[in-house]
Amino acid sequence: MIRMSPKSWIAVALVALIQTAVLVHIIYGRISLLRDGREIVAEVIPVDPRDIFRGDYVILGYGFSQGGNVPVPNETRQGDTVYVTLMPGEGEGRWEVASSALSLATPANPEHVVLKGIVNSVYNRPGQGPIASVRYGIESYFVPEGTGRELEKKVLEKKISAVLAVGTSGEVAIKALVVDGERVVEEPLL
């Protein structure tokens, strides 16, 4: 049997405490975003790709994130973090890009929200400036087993919206899915 000195026990306990603190921080961040984040409802548009190995999930697209349509500053590069300000569009659940920046800024209009995203690719449009494809981390959503195909049909029929929780620093998470005005899938806090 190996005997450990008191200093070794203290070191092991300290490492375990640090690991536990990191896990608590990660879990608490997600819980506080879902509980306290500003709720917005975003219209969902159909997206085609499918992966049979990931289980039941729904791929979601949003009008504000489709087709590389986010105007970005000239110095924006692939992999950059970008903060995209959205404003309410015409119709329920429709959000449009108002602006973007490489640093977080509080929107002047209280109706606007800022989403933090990662630039997938940047395209230069002659005479108009660059636009980017941005990934926000809300493009797919795992659902209860056996419900994925039915929800996918609803996405294609444009009968589904996503309730998004948006934090003050731009982080965003899917809080729930709404089908025909009724919340059918709610993200648990844990």
Image (spheres, rainbow, N blue to C red):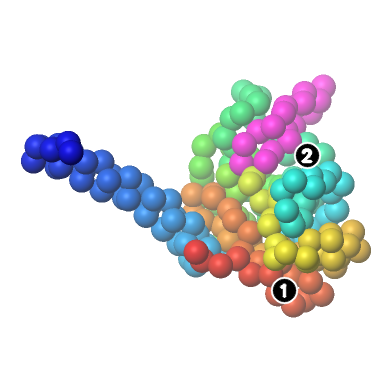
Taking 71 as reference, is 35 left or right?
left
Numbered range of the magenta stretch:
117-135
Q: Is residue 57 left or right of residue 117?
A: right
From this view, report whether residue 46 is shown above or below residue 128. below
N-term-proximal mark, 1 vs 2: 2
Q: Which residue appears at 69% of the width and 32% of the height?
A: 120
Can you give x and y, in whole percent of width and height, for residue 10 in the image?
14, 42
Depicted 12 relative to depicted 25: above or below: above
Amino acid, disc 1: Val
In terms of depth relative to the viewer, which is nearer, 12 or 110?
Answer: 12
Q: Amino acid at mark 2?
A: Asn
Q: Which mark is residue 69?
A: 2
The image quadrant of residue 66 is top right
Name the main secondary structure of what is drawn in magenta: strand
For the point 73% across and 36% down, the residue is 133
At horizontal 82% and vertical 75% (from top left) the residue drawn is 180
User: In the image, 107: left or right of 148?
Assistant: left
Tell me the residue at 63%/59% (across/down).
174
- Badge 2, how many Cα within 10 Å: few under 14, some, many 20+? some
Q: Which mark is residue 184?
A: 1
SS at badge 2: loop
Q: Is residue 63 above or below residue 36?
A: above
Badge 1 marks a residue whose secondary structure is strand
